[in-house]
Image (cartoon, rainbow, N blue to C red):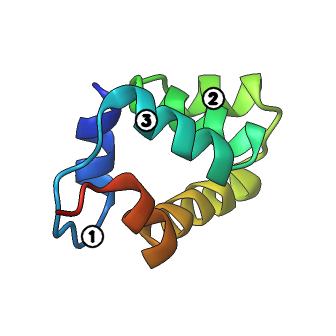
Amino acid sequence: MTLTDGLTNDIKILNFDLKDEVELRLILKRRLTKKEFKFYNMKNDGISKDEIAKDLALDDKRYEEMAVTVIKKINSEKVKNELTLKD
């Protein structure tokens, strides 16, 4: 799945088109921690929960917390504004 597809699914209200893949990757890299960025990319690539948790040394509770945190950050107005093209 492309980053654009993943973000389209994860952003609750998307009023504008997303920027290109390269820009999206740079923005997320800047806005998320290294671990959150890696987590989001792995999840977006369809890697299983168990493999992600093992690779990032996360227990079940921390995995769920990170999933919620990443989605909240991506859905914040500030980040959404950076990710989208506005005329």
Which secondary structure, mark 1? Answer: loop
Say which residue label 2 marks. Answer: 52
Q: Residue furthest front?
A: 87
Q: Identity of the amino acid at label 2?
A: Ile
Q: Residue furthest bottom?
A: 77
In terms of image quadrants, where is residue 64? bottom right
Residue 33 x, y percent position in the rendering: 75, 47
Q: Earlier in the sequence, mark 2 or mark 3?
A: 3
Q: Earlier in the sequence, mark 2 or mark 1?
A: 1
State which mark lies toward you, 1 or 3: 3
Say which residue label 3 marks. Answer: 23
Residue 79 x, y percent position in the rendering: 49, 64
State which mark lies toward you, 2 or 1: 1
Q: Residues within 10 Å of mark 1 (few under 14, many from 20)?
A: few
Residue at coordinates 78% horizontally, 45% vertically from top-left?
59
Q: Is residue 26 above or below residue 33?
A: above
Q: Identity of the amino acid at label 3?
A: Glu
State which mark lies toward you, 2 or 3: 3
Which secondary structure, mark 3? Answer: helix
Q: Earlier in the sequence, mark 1 or mark 3?
A: 1
Residue nearest the observer in this picture, 36 or 60: 36
Q: Quarter of the image for the C terminus: give it.
A: bottom left
13 vs 33, left or right, is: left
Which secondary structure, mark 2? Answer: helix
Q: Quarter of the image for the N terminus: give it.
A: top left
Say which residue label 1 marks. Answer: 12
Q: Residues within 10 Å of mark 2 (few under 14, many from 20)?
A: some
